[in-house]
Image: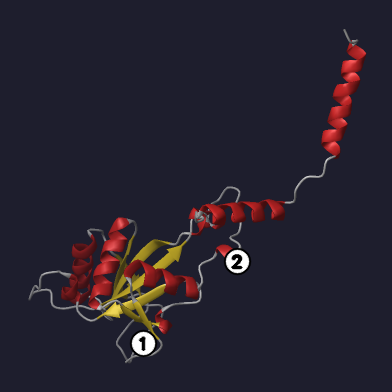
Amino acid sequence: PTSPCIHSISISALTIITLSLPKASNRRRKKCCVSTMADEGKTNVMKDIKVDKLVLNCCVGESGDRLTRAARVLEQLTGQQPVYSKARYTLRTFGIRRNEKIAVHVTVRGEKALEILERGLKVKEYELLQQNFSETGNFGFGINEHIDLGIKYDPTTGIYGMDFFVCLTRPGARVARRKVRQGRVGRPHKVTKEDAIKWFQDKFEGVVLAKPV
């Protein structure tokens, strides 16, 4: 039987040897993970792009019955209570006063946002321009008649056009907005204009034109 002193010496020697071994750098570990995922044919789920929100805006340019009817159209389309927007300053040419309600908008998220977005893109025949996409990975377009979205025409309401604004994001973007342990999103993880165009082409089989035909 060996003495306890020899055991303690051997254990301490193993500890010293283990601590003295160099550790792999984080960059090397990331490269190993990426190469392993590429070999297995897997994709990084954190790089998947999704719709963060869809904003529908209907600018009437005046307050009164027309604005109320426009709010009714948005509520009928989304099933949500719209929010009124006010003018920032007075424009006598257009008869707009400061702090006057002139527009109405609503924000939609989740599956309902994708459904309404697809209905709007169907009106545009899944064709957008490059100038519809921003450098931050968002895009927008407009339609002239809300009845093209499948809403029944009502003579008492009239016909209204509206703007679609789509915000794209990747999982993990919440770290830049949360209150506790707030961080920043790195440049490789942000959605760019090219990423948004590729997502639109893959998701809806859309066409992006350089200029109007």
At horizontal 91% and vertical 16% (from top left) the residue drawn is 6
Residue 4 picture location, percent across and down: 89, 12
Q: Which mark is residue 167?
A: none
Counting every numbered tag in the picture gives 2
Q: Quadrant of the C terminus?
A: bottom left
Q: Earlier in the sequence, mark 1 or mark 2?
A: 1
Toward the viewer: 174 or 122?
122
Crowd tier of the residue under label 2, counting other residues whose Cα lies within 10 Å: few below 14, some 14–19, many 20 or above = few
Residue at which label 2 appears: 187
At horizontal 35% and vertical 65% (from top left) the residue drawn is 54
State the separation of the CA atoms marked 1 and 2. 40 Å
Which image quadrant for residue 7?
Answer: top right
What is the residue that sits farthest to the left in this orientation? 155
Residue 61 picture location, percent across and down: 28, 81
Q: What is the three-letter code of the residue carrying label 2?
A: Arg
At horizontal 50% and vertical 59% (from top left) the residue drawn is 47
Toward the viewer: 181 or 135?
135
Of tags 1 and 2, the one toward the viewer is 2
User: Vertical placement of 18 versus 173: above or below?
Assistant: above
Question: In the picture provided, is 148 more to the left or to the right than 126?
Answer: left
Q: What is the three-letter code of the residue carrying label 1?
A: Leu
Toward the viewer: 83 or 192?
192
Q: Which mark is residue 91?
A: 1
Which image quadrant for residue 99?
Answer: bottom left
Toward the viewer: 181 or 202?
202
Residue 8 picture location, percent across and down: 88, 18
Q: Quadrant of the N terminus?
A: top right
Question: In the picture provided, is 157 more to the left or to the right than 118?
Answer: left
Residue 113 picture location, percent across and down: 31, 62
